[in-house]
Amino acid sequence: MTNLVKRYGQTLAVDSLSLSVPQGSMFGFLGPNGSGKSTTIGCLTGLLDPTAGSVEILGSPFTAESAGLKRRMGVMPETLGLFDPLYAHEFLAFVARMYGLEESDVRRRVTELLAALDLTDARKTLAEFSTGMRKRVAFAASVIHSPDVLFLDEPFESIDPAGVALLKQWLRRFTEQGRTVFITSHVLETVERLCDRVAIITKPGKLVWQGGITVLAGEGAIHHDGKDFGSLEALFLHLTGERYTDLNWL
Amino acid sequence: MNWKRIGDLIRLRYKLMWARTRLRSGKIALFAIGYLLVALLAALLAAGGLGAGILAIRTGQAERMAQVVLSGLFVNAVFGSVLLGFGMNAVFGDVELRRFPLRRRERFVARHFLGMADPFWFFILALEAGLVVGLYVYGTYSFWYGALAVLLLHVCSYLLTRVVGVWAENLMNTRSGSMVVLGLILALSLVPGTLMPMLKKNPALAAGSLAVLRYTPPFGAAAAMTHQGPRAFLGMGLIALWAVGLAAVLAALERRPAGRRQAAANVGVAWESPLDRVASLFGPRMAPLVGYWLRFYLRNNRFRMLYLFSLPLAAFIVYNLGQIPKWVASPFVAALGALPIVAFMGTSRIAVNQYGYAGGAFRRFFLFPTDSAASLRAGSYAAVLLSAAMIPPTAILWAVFAPRPLDPRVVLMPAIDAVTALFAFHAIGLWTTLYGPRRGDYDKSIGNDLSLMGNIVVIGSTFACIFAPIALGRAATPANWWLALPPAALAAAFYAASLRGASAVFPGRRERLLAVLEGKA
């Protein structure tokens, strides 16, 4: 994305954000609450129209009407975007058909995903699923058509450890095949272990740092502002403004 | 009882109302003017009640007059709010109130005080209060007895409405609930038509019915208003007893919350249902979306209830309006208005607010590799398909009960009118979806969660259907059946143009829709 700007009326949500995500990377997109992460993902996936700036995905210009590119993208939105009156298999089959999969592939992939993600209770509609199960369904819907780029907005929250381990394993294999994952999360330890590169933004959607973080896995440190940061958390707190307020009644 | 906290919550309810209006730019003035109009209307309604009070004194039949007026208001308040949903929206649920330091009984009282603070109930109270003032000013009746009786009656009508609402909600979540509700609605719709002739023929039955009615809240209130001493106390005691009883029933019903409709135990993964086969008629690109929307409608309690209700409603309108000789002239004219209502009643709530019940799922439509307005069109196709399916059975039913000898044009003309209403309503529904959205609760069967524009379209269309044939006067005869054809063609053209027009507008409206649906506007 180049000089991406998004305004809601007078409110600036994203301020001239420019980012380049290498193909085949696991890219972490971090920022405090309300910093514009979901708005940026909205612009990158066609939900929102940028006020200014441009977006390129897989080397081609992207707009809300870029149907060809959308076919190659998988998105797990912040609100999950589930159709609550449907059963899990109906929803996944619906999504797969919308992406134009052959009927035999629809049935095979839905069956395999439901089994792998332990979503085989066919008596419950999505509205009756627990938060963690809903998250698994949303993840399944984002990968069912084997996209080349995957946008995941807070994918690990509410999922149990076994489920998180499975998703991580799938995501690693995904990038090994040369596909790209764009991920937002507040769980910095997970991002540190999973991602190769990270971008950190602050309010209002302003880029403050981006770079590789693989050095942290080898007990190394990230050098920034003349300081060494041994963890992503330390760097994040430094960049976004570490605050500690003591409430004496608490 | 923590009255201070309950008072705080009532204040918060009005603050929230105000805040919601303030969030929408340019609506502040509208809100103020709206409330001014409401106040004027309330004054007018109170004057109406006052008129009844004056009439009661002048005719010398104060108690009988009060019984009639209060019973009418009571029945209208209960059924009007259950059917149209006014005054039925819970501001805070029990779960939300649990975060506050309130005991179960206090939460119950707080929720229902908040419910009674809905402006709708003030209309009813204003009317009832007008009667009290009339009896006091022009007669010799006690103002305080009357005021207390009206307040208790007001509580009774609110509680009965809630009891009916919660009971219907619970019932709709059972497997055979829809059929039970349909049976009850059918029975109730036939009551006025069958009971009145029976009562006229059999005075003893009328006297017996009157004796039973003496134990109802409106009759109790009428006695308390128009008597003094023991009879007034008895009347007051009767309403108080009803209020306590209804509160107990409501508390018991609320303790057994509605379970979700359970699928059959042996449900398995079905890859293609009849709905998918119907949807496939729209081509491979639209089929998944149409299939989804068909399920969205058919699994919605509100749709099912209104869909089933539309047929007895049509029968009720034909039967009752058709008996007003000078005004409507014939059952045929009544049928010209009733059949078109069937063509949109079932789908009406969702068709004018397609995305209002989708919540966060709305985002999903923009992720698919298709034009985003396809979801809007698919939703409308599903609604038209479902509504159109009601026209043939309604026409056949009308043919069975229509006056003999049967002229085919007597069936044909209302059926063509129904097609007109089908296309015209769903065309307007597309625009209302885009310009009058409101976040609603998919799981609620009862309650009105449409925007002002949505309500105007639904209620206005219903009244337009009933009154348009009456306005036609002598032209509304079977011989002029062909008069129905041009409006049907125009409505179909309007629908086609609306599909194209709304699809073009949709991408530009999506951020506004998203803000409304996610509670940010």
Image (cartoon, rainbow, N blue to C red):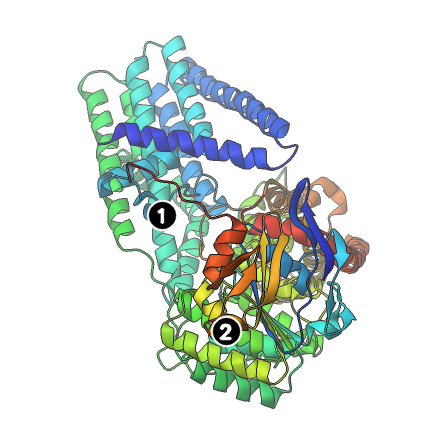
- Please say if B374 is above or below B255: below
Q: Quadrant of residue B380?
A: bottom right
The residue mark sitting in front, 1 or 2, is: 2
Residue sitting at x 24%, y 26%: B235
| Numbered badge on residue B164 | 1
The image quadrant where one finds the C terminus of chain B is top right
Horizontally, residue A230 falls left or right of residue A29, namely: left
Q: Nearer the viewer, residue B57 or B264?
A: B264
Image location of residue A126, percent across then percent down = 45, 68
Numbered label attached to residue B281: none
Label 2, residues with CA under 10 Å away: few <14, some 14-19, many ≥20: many
Q: Amino acid at mark 1?
A: Val
Which residue is at 22% across, 37% downward? B244
Identify the amino acid type marked 2.
Answer: Leu
Q: Give SS at disc 1.
A: helix
Q: Can residue B142 be seen by looking at this rendering? A: yes
Chain letter for the residue marked with disc 1 in the picture: B
Query: Could you say which quadrant of the image residue B169 lies in?
Result: bottom left
Q: Quadrant of the N terminus of chain B?
A: top left
Residue A194 disc label: 2
Q: Nearer the viewer, residue B503 or B279?
A: B503
In the picture, measured across the screen, residue A195 lies left or right of residue B495, that is left
Residue B232 % position (x, y): 23, 21
Mark 2, secondary structure of its residue = helix
